[in-house]
Image (tube, grey):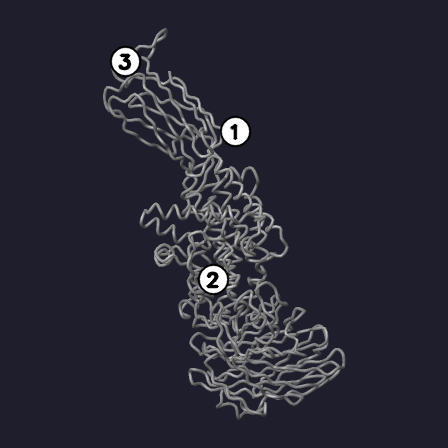
Amino acid sequence: MMKWNLKKLTKHTVLLVASVTLVACGSSDEETPIVTPSSAVIDTAVVTTSHANDVTEVGEQVSLNLEFNKALLQNRTLTVHWLIADSEVSFHEERFDVEKGATTLKLQLDTVNPESERYDTQNQVLMSVTLGNNEAVFSNEFELWGAPPAAKLFNSNGFKWYTEQQASKLVDEQLFQVIGTDFTPWPLPADPTWHEDPYDNNTWLLYYHSLGWLYGMDYAYEQTGDAEILERIEFYILDYLNDVPRDGSNNYMAWNDHAVAWRFETLTYLYQKYFRKRWHGEQWQTIESQFLDHADELVELLHDDRYYAHNHSMYHALSLYNFSFALPRLNHEFGYRHEAETRINELFDEMVNNKTGVSVEQSTSYHFIAMELFVDANQFTYTMTGEPMAELADNLAMMADFAAHFIYRNGNASAMGDSNYDRAIWLERLQRIIENGAIASSYTTHLSTAGESGTPLLANYVAADDGYVIQRPGYDYARNEIFTFTDFGKKLFSHGHHDAGNVIATDHGAPLLIDSGGPYLYNSPKRAHFRSAYAHNTLIVDEQATFANDASVLGAACIDEMCYSLGLIDEASYQHWRLVVTQRDGDTPRWSVIDIATSKTDELHAYKLVYHFPDDADVVPETDSAQCQTITLATTQAYCMQVAGSTALTVTKWQGVDDATYTQGWVQPGFGKRIPAPVLEFTGTGQQLLAVTELRTVAEAHQPMATVQTVNAAAMTYTIELGRYTMTLNDLASPAPTVHVTTNN
């Protein structure tokens, strides 16, 4: 007779005891020893656990102890099968050699996931054991909850350190480096206080408190097997959890929302990979409580209105979702997965305008981050459950189409919002997202194949709800690319800037009117400049560095070789209409910007037209605003900017100025970096302003500037002569003005 008892000795070690008495088939009153164990019969098996409902998790170990009624007379093979209870189909099998003479056998068995392609499983399972050719004995049923291996868990941060270089820096040199910044690598203390702040910077602190750098030590341990490295990883984790409690007197970034999400990813990964079998008893009870503090903090953040439509909320949700699979029993008790799934699905709608495919975070960089997060969320869900979270094919296709139009042919793009200036990375990044997400975007195909296949870009791409107009007059991939982006978007949100009316211009991929980028550093006073209207090609009224209201697109179209966009900036004390016209004559570009600003108070206003140029451009100003202000690019191509206004305009050039009175003339090529770049400002005073800005090559600067004639002052109807084209702006004062274009022979 055989009895099995499956008992939990600790939270993470299941003990399966099997007392085996081998009897001859058909015996009744007494046990009869037999010559060989091949005819042995095991009568019964009983399985119990210390968990309610007889539950265990994949990743926990099973101890199997076997006793035989007498020493085996020869070497035998023992087979253990794990079976799905309903079907008794084996999902895992292990064989063990039992040596001649054995009377007992003790085995440590790792539980395995019943299904290879999903981890959201709760299966009733049982085990069977056979010795040699004997009949199998079955245990009673118990519930086995799936959990993924650490390598399949979500990793949005730690991968940065999971490299040979970072492993060496952390282990050999004992230096911590915030990757992607200019912070000098910092000596990592053997016993941190977790209040360290060597650079007085919240970005450095974010990565420090994320503990993502422990992935570098993980890499080193994998390569060397040095137990001291694993002990060091464990020390840092336990020291942090003990010294930085949720309600403690911590550094202000320790429980920052993003730090919590990233840190919980790290803790979940390392727990699943190394410490599930190592932490038990009272120690685990303490750690479990600290893990639950992180989970509960993330649940609160999911309901925090500050993170509406924000990428941080996606990180919160994915970190919690990730944890729910690694510790399914806690998920079952507290419902973390449902909380995370609900929020992720909400964010699919919140983070992007589903009519246009444009990220609501008003940033080049964060539009791409949104695409990556959407792809990652769906792929991670598929890895865990065998199904995607949502059907996002159409959403991702629209997001990719917008990105394809927004970037330049050479892979660069305007540094809208919090984005680095002059980074020719965007086409490659878009291609990678397209491939990873299996996204259908014929426009991206067009760019990737240099126009040989796919759908040609639209000459006039308008995302009116977002306020964005992207134009390429006379577009053909074989022609010189003349590009204009005009931002009549919503007021600052998330990673956006105060950039209403901002206009960007490039000639064959060479930036001419540029965006300064940002944020520089998130907790630096300098961030205010990069976010302000002063850092953009805008009209500033009365030194108002911010915009309180949404701007709006009133119209945009392309006719032959000309495109225009018209928008309105409507603030408390003034209204500002901006018309941006882009023409091409062959490969020669011409930009005309018409600004009409009126006071709501009949008072005089100080007007300032601001234009930013590339950092390597040579800008030579003239006193007369209508004369040629020469801009020579690094390509040696020279352009003229001329500004004529209804009031006298003073010309000022700024480059790399930052003092107690003024900051102007900077761009951000990388996080925490800034370099000087030339800016021209045209300032004047009046109740109203009507200004014409011309930007064209020096060779074309002798041609007449655009002229504006008032047709009806009350209705604000104007005629604009642009050489080959005449435009009429009808009833600007009305809610729905119209634009009429005539081609001149």
Total tally of numbered discs in the picture:
3
Q: Position of residue 233 (x, y in %)?
A: 41, 48
Q: Which mark is residue 53?
A: 1
584, 225: nearer the viewer: 225
Where 543 falls versus 344 (above or below)? Answer: below
> Of the numbered discs in the image, which one, if any, rests on residue 34?
3
Q: Looking at the picture, how far across and down is residue 666, in whole percent?
A: 52, 76
User: In this view of the protein, can residue 559 be seen by the observer?
Assistant: no
Q: The N terminus is located in which quarter?
A: top left
Residue at 44% across, 39% down: 279
Q: Which quadrant, please, contains the C terminus? A: bottom right
Which element is circle 3 on?
Answer: loop
Judge by depth and name the residue closer to the eye, 617 or 239: 239
Above or below for 26 versus 540: above
Secondary structure category for the residue under label 2? loop
Q: Residues within 10 Å of mark 3 (few under 14, many from 20)?
A: some
Specify the label residue 418 is tagged with.
Answer: none
Picture disc at residue 441? 2
Q: Amino acid at mark 1?
A: Asn
How many angstroms separate mark 3 from mark 2 (CA)? 74 Å
- Tell me which label, 3 or 2, sits earlier in the chain: 3
Q: Nearer the viewer, mark 3 or mark 2?
A: 3
Q: CA distance from mark 3 to mark 1?
A: 39 Å
Residue 518, given in percent of the width and then of the height, sits at 53, 69
